Amino acid sequence: MSPKQPSRRRFLKNGAALAGLAVSATKGASPLVAEPSPDRVDDLHLYGERSRFVGSVRNGSIDNPERRLPNEPNAYGLKTPLQFSAGMITPASLHFVVSHGFEPPDIDPREHRLLIHGMVDRPLMFTVDELKRLPSVSRFHFIECRGNSSTAGPGGPSRVAKNATVQDTHGFTSCSQWTGVLLSLLLKEAGVQKGATWILAEGADPTKHSKSFPIAKALDDMLIAWDQNGEPVRPEQGFPLRLVVPGWQGINNVKWLRRIDVVDEPYMAMMETSRYPSIKPDGESRWFEFELGPKSVITRPAGGQHLPVAGFYEISGLAWSGAGAIRRVEVSIDGGRSWKDAELEGPVARKAHTRFKLPWTWKGEEAVLQSRCTDDQGAVQPSLAEMAKIRGLDVDFFKTPTVSVGDINAIQPWKVNRDGSIENALF
Amino acid sequence: MRFSRLMRSAVFLLVATAALAQTPSYPNVGRTPTKQEIQAWDISVGPDGKGLPTGHGSAREGVAIYAAKCASCHGPQGEGGKIGPRLVGTKEDLESLTTLKPVRTAGSYWPYATTIWDYINRAMPRNQGGTLAPDEVYALTAFILARSGVIQEGDVLDTKSLPKVQMPNRNGFVPQNFADIPDAKKRGCKQGVCP
């Protein structure tokens, strides 16, 4: 086996300079646990790798330029290969990535700082190591791009194509165990002043991505994560600090977090006022749509796969909701005429992927497999027709790839043909 | 408990150069940033102009800066290029919002001129965010707005006039009232969709 190539690293050469402005001369204390030098990570005995026979990888617009956003030519998306997923955890290497036009900055965690300021009694500046000393929580949470499973945009054609895989249709979502400090703890330490109703979070990327949040969410379950699945958050996921905003659209999960400003109004930053509002047919835009709806999809057997023989198959998939926990997943094998409750793999976590499974014996017949989830608020995942109705639109509207209509969480049908081939049956 | 807390605070106030702010619950975690640090880090500009630094610029001044620093990505007239999206907006762009091919340019779709200032300042030119002087950012903001027909070529934007610019799509967003935004139930948001 060949050792990893250090040249795989693709950071901006000047990434460290972009990481933040100079801090005052007072150094932070030395860390509790010193990070070992990374000079031995290329040794596979010391930092392991998958079998050379395993090749599942992310895919996306980085090698399919036709899927790139016309408005953001340098943005790219990488989708998780959900067809190979098991359980509820996405390995960090396969966690989806959406980059809005740049490679991850190369941040030295020893120099990185988090500033909390604004309408607070005590502004605070933290080192990463200091944040790690604070009381921590470990939470399972999915992150999902708002455009995941959307029929709109340049990714639309690959999402609706008959030969789409579940990676193509739903791959902009992943789930990890995030460990970090609750933002609410930091805000309590800083002392939020009366009249503060919003916060602004800002990242240390080349665009200094910034996003406004109602203070209630900040005091609820927002998390400043420094660990993902037992390892430091990776650069492509926001090393050394990533804001995790459970259940809310992906753009909220600010990577390379450097600053929290406590304020009294939404700051109307670029992404939240221009790219992310969804446009209604009458031309009006809805801004600040935060929470993602209930969604589920069968990951196996699914599009692009092939049933080799008539016989037993466990139907398996994932369900999740921005509102809370999944309460129920139903699966239909007869095109929606009848539904059966699938088993949920426990423990079921709130605002996290939940694995569901249903035993199935395929006798060689044509079949249409689909799943439908219900969350703990009672919201039920809609079919495409139902979703169109909720939005006051015709189903055909969703065949138009150019329009942004917000989160598309429609039930995903997979058609099994007599020869065992499986295709996308959304339309 | 409160007394010992007071004692601790008093002791630390006496320690001269202590940049260590004693947080009440977690001793020796984090420090108080200096005012200069906060000022240097706090680059955000709010919709009412809060945070705008002193400075000024008009489209006339913006022409040369745009040509030198922006045109290579965004096209010579702000019409967009291979790397940068279209900046200048037209009435047709505004009207396109009701069609199946809505166009969202800074000049036609963005609700706040302050957002243009804020974004150019923090993020532009590409991979060189933070290198433009405030006057340049005012001038470039004015350039985009003037070319989009929102202001006149000679109008000077500064801390007072920039927030007052009436953007063509300012009222095109719901909910209009900021106070109505956070309450999803009140708004009627369901299953990821808001009305």
Image (cartoon, helix red, strand yellow):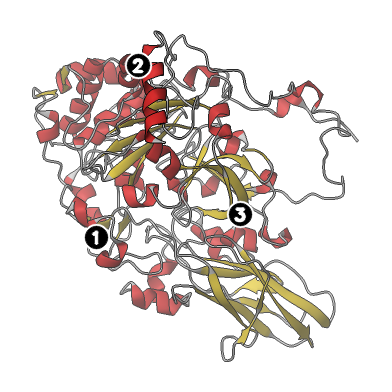
Split into 4 quadrants, where in the image is the N terminus of chain B?
A: top left
Residue A104 appears in view: yes
Q: Is residue A107 above or below residue A65?
A: above
The picture quadrant where one finds residue A305 is: bottom right
Q: Is residue B153 above or below residue B182?
A: above
Q: Which chain is home to disc 2?
A: B
Determine whether the residue tagged by mark 1 lies in a helix, strand or loop.
helix
Circle nearer the N terminus (1, 2): 2
For label 3, the residue is A175
Badge 3: how crowded within 10 Å, few (<14), some, or many (20+)?
many
Instruction: Give the residue type at disc 2.
Output: Thr
Q: Which chain is home to disc 1?
A: B
Q: Nearer the viewer, residue B35 or A151?
A: B35
Q: Disc 3 to disc 1, how far (Cα)?
A: 36 Å
Instruction: Give the residue type at disc 1.
Output: Thr
Residue that appears at 15% across and 30% down: B146
Residue B79 x %, y %: 30, 35
Query: Marks 3 and 1: which is nearer the front?
Result: 3
Instruction: Give the residue type at disc 3.
Output: Cys
For label 2, the residue is B34
